[in-house]
Image (spheres, rainbow, N blue to C red):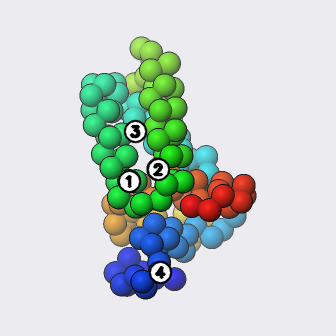
Amino acid sequence: MHSAATPLPATERKVDRLLAHYGESHQNPTNEAIHMIAIPAIMLSIVGLLYALHPWAAYVFVAASGVYYLMLRSASFVIAMAACIVAALAAVQAMGDLVLPISATIFVVAWIFQFIGHQIEGKKPSFFEDIQYLWVGPLFVLSRLFMRLGVRW
């Protein structure tokens, strides 16, 4: 495993290094289970909160997120994240006039569970080290799903 500052071996991709580092603080099965639900909920709530502020704020956020995922150069993750982004935007639009209270509630509840998970794990969240880990979290969820399905990312 490599820390965020350790140079990459020639054969290791950045996405693999990020996921390995993220995984170091997500080894407890209860914490991982919490993250499998809370991370998608948090991402949905962020899109919803931004959408409530102004739809273009949400579109800019998901576009910037898409660029970040493209830069990691993993076709499987890019395709899966594109589908997740489309689903999140559709869900947010389906919330209609309730997008702000629903998104705010999801945001607060999901973060409470995230911190409970890290209390159980006994390790601080990765994004305290580096903000990019907020975008790695959804990849962690996908990587766990991909592993269960036998998909190589």
What secondary structure is found at the residue carrying circle 3? helix
What secondary structure is found at the residue carrying circle 2? helix
Badge 2 amino acid: Val
Q: Nearer the viewer, mark 3 or mark 2?
A: 2
Residue 38, percent from left and from top: 56, 47
Badge 1 amino acid: Leu
Task: Return the mark for residue 78.
Answer: 2
Q: Residue at (37%, 32%) from the top-left corner?
A: 49
Task: Return the mark for residue 46.
Answer: 3
- Asked whether 146 or 22 is in front, the reply is 146
Residue 48, percent from left and from top: 41, 30
Task: Return the mark for residue 11.
Answer: 4
Q: Nearer the viewer, mark 3 or mark 4?
A: 4
Question: Against 22, is 81 above or below?
Answer: above
Crowding at dot 3, Cα within 10 Å, few <14 / some 14-19 / many 20+, comes out as: many
Quote the CA–CA distance across marks 4 and 2.
20 Å
Q: Residue at (45%, 72%) from the top-left corner?
A: 13
Quote the CA–CA distance across marks 4 and 1.
19 Å
Residue 35, percent from left and from top: 58, 54
Q: Are marks 2 and 1 in contact (CB under 8 Å)?
A: yes
Q: Is residue 92 visible?
A: yes
